[in-house]
C-alpha cells in the first residue's frame, strides 16, 4: 500500500504539530525552520517520507523520530509513542500509519542542523535509500564492507559507493535484482571475513 498525496499534510492544533505520513522529510524540515519549531533538525537529507521514518525509527546518531514523537494514527486510532515497540532503526507499528503528532517546542537550531549536516558530508550525492545496513554494536557497516573489498563494487548500474561503502547508489538504470545481488554479496563476504551477520536498515519488499 502506498499513501496518496492527500496524506502529505502539516497542520497545527493547539500545542501539537500533526503531520501526514506521506509528507516528505524535506518539507517537514522546511516547515520546522520557517515556524521556529525545534526537534526536526535531524530530518535534513534523510530520504523518504514521515511514514518511512516512523516504520524504521529513522534518525542520525542519538536523534531519532521516536525521541520527539507523541503519537501515531494507526488503522484510524491514535496510539501513544511509548506504547509502540521500537528501538534502533525499527518500530513495530502493527498497521497502517497515516498521521503522527509531535508536541510543538520552539527554538529551531541552525547550529544543530549544521553539525548534523557535517556528519553527512561523506555521503554520496547519487540517488540512494540511505544506509543499507545497521551498524553492528561497536563497529560500522561501512568499514566492514570496505574491509571486505567491496567499496566501489558494481553490478550493472548499482554500486557500493566509492565515497561511503554502506550506501548503495544508483548510477543511472540500476535494477532491484542488481541491488539485491550486491546486498547479498556484502552480507556473505562480511560474514566470511568477520563472522558478523549484517542486518538491513532498509526494508526489502
Image (tube, grey):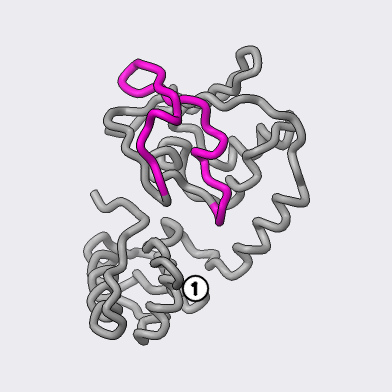
Question: Could you say which is closer to the camera, residue 127 or residue 15?
Answer: 15
Find the magenta span and give its range: 60-87
**Which corner quadrant of the image does residue 130 belong to?**
bottom left
Decide: is 72 above or below 50. Answer: above
| Position in image of residue 144 (x %, y %) | 39, 78
| Position in image of residue 178 (x %, y %) | 26, 68
Quarter of the image with the N terminus in it: top left
Q: Secondary structure at mark 1?
A: loop
**Residue extending furthest top?**
14
Residue 152 visible to the viewer: no
Classify 10 Å Cα crowding around label 1: few (below 14), some (14-19), many (20 and above): many
Decide: is 22 above or below 115. Answer: above
**Which corner quadrant of the image does residue 21 belong to?**
top left
Decide: is 170 above or below 142. Answer: above
Decide: is 151 above or below 80. Answer: below
| Residue at image point 35% right, 84% down | 148
| Residue at image point 74% right, 30% down | 106
| Position in image of residue 15 (x %, y %) | 65, 17
Magenta span includes 81: yes
| Residue at image point 40% right, 22% down | 79
| Position in image of residue 136 (x %, y %) | 39, 67
Residue 146 visible to the viewer: yes
Question: Could you say which is closer to the camera, residue 183 or residue 116?
Answer: 116
| Residue at image point 54% right, 64% down | 125
Amino acid at each position: 500500500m502506498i499513501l496518496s498525496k492527500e496524506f502529505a499534510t502539516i497542520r497545527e492544533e493547539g500545542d501539537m504539530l500533526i503531520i501526514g505520513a506521506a509528507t516528505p522529510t524535506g518539507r517537514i524540515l522546511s516547515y520546522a525552520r520557517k515556524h521556529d519549531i525545534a526537534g526536526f533538525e535531524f530530518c535534513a537529507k534523510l530520504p523518504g517520507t514521515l511514514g518511512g521514518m516512523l516504520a524504521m525509527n529513522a534518525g542520525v546518531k542519538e536523534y531519532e523520530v521516536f525521541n520527539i514523537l507523541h503519537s501515531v494514527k494507526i488503522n484510524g486510532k491514535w496510539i501513544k509513542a511509548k506504547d509502540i515497540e521500537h528501538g534502533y532503526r525499527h518500530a513495530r507499528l502493527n498497521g497502517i500509519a497515516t498521521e503522527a503528532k509531535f508536541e510543538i517546542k520552539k527554538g529551531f537550531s541552525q547550529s544543530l542542523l549544521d553539525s548534523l549536516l557535517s556528519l553527512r558530508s561523506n555521503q554520496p550525492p547519487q540517488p540512494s535509500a540511505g544506509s543499507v545496513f545497521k551498524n553492528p554494536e561497536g563497529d560500522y557497516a561501512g568499514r566492514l564492507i570496505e574491509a571486505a573489498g567491496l567499496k566501489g563494487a558494481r553490478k550493472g548500474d548499482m554500486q557500493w559507493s566509492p565515497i561511503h561503502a554502506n550506501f548503495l547508489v544508483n548510477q543511472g538504470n540500476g535494477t532491484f535484482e542488481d541491488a539485491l545481488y550486491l546486498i547479498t554479496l556484502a552480507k556473505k563476504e562480511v560474514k566470511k571475513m568477520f563472522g558478523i551477520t549484517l542486518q538491513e536498515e532498509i526494508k526489502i519488499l
